[in-house]
Amino acid sequence: MEESLGTVHEKLEGWVPKLASAEEVRAALEKAFDYRGDLTLTLKNGDTIEGYLFDRKIEGPRLEDCFVRVMPKDRADKISIRYSEIAALSFSGRDTAAGKSFAAWVKKYNERKAAGEKNIGIDPEPLE
């Protein structure tokens, strides 16, 4: 678990949740919505979609009434997929925010400052 400022983030990278019940599907897709990396969705028709899950819509109590919205890696369009169409889910992409809590940044900043570095700022790290 990653802990920062009262928030606990699970380390989900590489996890393949069991999707045997509606509750497990819902719980896994909630975690997928909060995940900061790509996922691989395997649909019941055999198709596989890899991309970033950026939205979900819960419009009723049945899995058929709920959707996730995904930006596929290999396409420019965004697609909607019913929860009921998902056979498997894998947290396949790198979690781009793992280890990048504010507390981690402060620790690195203090180490660099103690080493005598000047002009230390908040610079983004390359994603890939």
Image (tube, grey):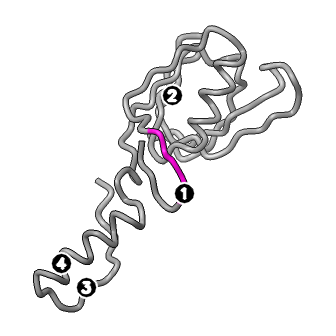
Q: Does residue 127 appear left or right of residue 35 in this picture? A: left
Q: Which mark sits nearer the N-terminus, 2 or 1?
A: 1
Please state the horizontal and vertical placement of residue 73, each as a whole percent of the image: 45, 41
Nearer the observer: mark 2 or 1; the answer is 1
Label 2 and label 3: CA atoms lie apart by 40 Å
Our reading of the magenta stretch's main secondary structure is strand
Disc 4/disc 3 C-alpha distance (Å) = 8 Å
Q: Residue at x 58, y 17 (%)?
A: 43
- Seen in the image, is 58 located left or right of residue 10? right
Earlier residue among tags 3 and 1: 1
Name the residue beneath numbered marker 3: 120
Q: Answer with mark 2 or mark 4, whichever residue precedes in sequence.
A: 2
In the structure shown, which secondary structural element does the residue marked by tag 4 occupy? Answer: helix
**Mark 1 lies on residue:** 6
Q: Label 4, on which residue?
A: 112
- Residue 19 figure quarter: top right
- Residue drawn at the location 40% of the way across and 45% of the way down: 95
Check the picture and name the quadrant holding the N terminus.
top left
Q: Are marks 2 and 4 in contact (CB under 8 Å)?
A: no
Label 4–label 3 contact, CB within 8 A: yes
Q: Which residues are magenta?
A: 6-10
